[in-house]
Amino acid sequence: MRKPRVSSPIEVKVEAVVNPSEDPQKVIGAIENVIERCSPEFRYGSRVIGRAAGSEPLSTIYEQVRSRSAMGVLRRMLLDNRAGTSTWFLLNKQAASAGIAAVIEDEQESPLGPIRVTINCEELDALTDWLVPESG
């Protein structure tokens, strides 16, 4: 994986609701499968939240969207959900449990709820172009 040409800090926040039928440790494991070095923790009685810095936490996403032809969906999500220096996208929680970073466009596509990944970076355009280059 090549590094992005970004000099400003990259902050990644990951959140997922833990349903009453779910084991919090399995939700934590699902997040760790697709977002590296984020140290997710069970908080507030019903959520798992993790934070990480740099581009390394996004390496699984970087690799898998290329192999699964999901770059267009992820790019659209990042652009549509942008607000200033922040953007977000959703991952299917069940797929993440199996180590698959499946980008989804709607929360309903993940029956037990999605994993929400929020990225903050002053150079969001460059980071987006690194993660999912614009196709010709």
Image: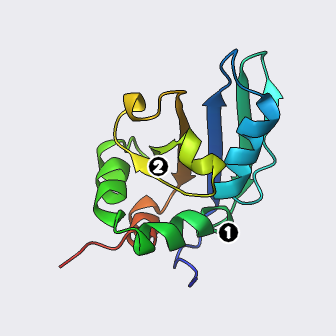
Kindly identify the amino acid type of the residue bearing the numbered disc 2: Thr
Spot the residue most to the bottom: 2
Q: Distance between the residues labelled 2 and 1?
A: 19 Å
- When asked about the image quadrant of residue 105, the answer is top left
Q: Which label was assigned to residue 67?
A: none
Quick check: 75 left or right of 114?
left
Which of labels 2 and 1 is toward the front? 1
Spot the residue most to the left: 136
The image position of residue 97, as x and y in percent, is 65, 47
Q: Residue at x 77, y 28 (%)?
A: 23
Front residue of this view, candidates 6 and 104: 104
Front residue of this view, candidates 7 and 110: 110
Front residue of this view, candidates 63 and 99: 99
Residue bearing mark 2: 85
| 15 up-or-down from 5: above or below | above
How many residues crowd around disc 1 within 10 Å: few (fewer than 14), some, or many (20 or more)? some
Q: Residue at x 42, y 73 (%)?
A: 66
How many residues crowd around disc 2 within 10 Å: few (fewer than 14), some, or many (20 or more)? few
Dot 1 lies on which element? Answer: helix
Q: How many labels does the image show?
A: 2
Would you say the residues marked 2 and 1 are in contact, meaning their CB atoms lie under 8 Å apart?
no
Q: Residue at x 31, y 55 (%)?
A: 73
Kindly identify the amino acid type of the residue bearing the numbered disc 1: Glu
Quick check: 90 left or right of 40?
left
Residue bearing mark 1: 56
